Image (cartoon, rainbow, N blue to C red):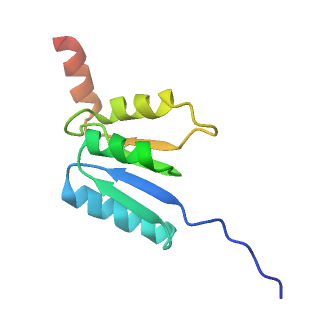
Amino acid sequence: MTAVDLPAAPRVLIADADPGVRNALIELVLSVRRDANLEVCSDGPRALEWLDLHPVNLIIADWDLPGFDGLSLLRGVREQQQQPAVPFILLSNRSDRDRKSTRLNS
């Protein structure tokens, strides 16, 4: 039998203001990679501050983060121009109807 080298434990940032959603995301990530190193925060500024100090393999963020939104966080991460680019999952609880009414009222 030969030894198999597994990739290092991934570092994942979860940024969401809702504690229930954060807990669900933690369970989801750990169900895929039990060895994942997780950083969990509830607002945009704290997420960006943490990202400035730590490399990550995946970012999962809510669109409606307090402080500044998840889209701004994504833009900040992309401006760092890391290669390869860090995978980023942007979550939203907005429906298509919400987006259409926002555009119409603008």
**Which residue of the protein is positioned furthest toward the right in this rendering?**
1
Left or right, residue 81 beside residue 24: right
Give the residue at x 48% y 73%.
34
Above or below, 100 relative to 50: above
**Which residue of the protein is positioned furthest toward the bottom in this rendering?**
1
**Closest to the observer, 103 or 84:** 84
Q: Position of residue 18 (x, y in %)?
A: 20, 52
* Figure quadrant of the C terminus: top left
Above or below, 75 relative to 40: above
Left or right, residue 71 beside residue 65: right
Give the residue at x 40% y 64%.
28
Above or below, 37 relative to 105: below
Q: Position of residue 68 (x, y in %)?
A: 25, 32
**Which residue of the protein is positioned furthest toward the left in this rendering?**
105
Give the residue at x 35% y 64%.
26
Instruction: Indicate the quadrant where residue 47 lies.
Output: top left
* Figure quadrant of the N terminus: bottom right
Q: Count the labels in the image.
A: 0
Q: Position of residue 62 (x, y in %)?
A: 30, 43
**Closest to the observer, 97 or 88:** 88
Instruction: Indicate the quadrant where residue 70 lies.
Output: top left
Q: Position of residue 92 (x, y in %)?
A: 30, 40
Give the residue at x 28% y 45%.
46
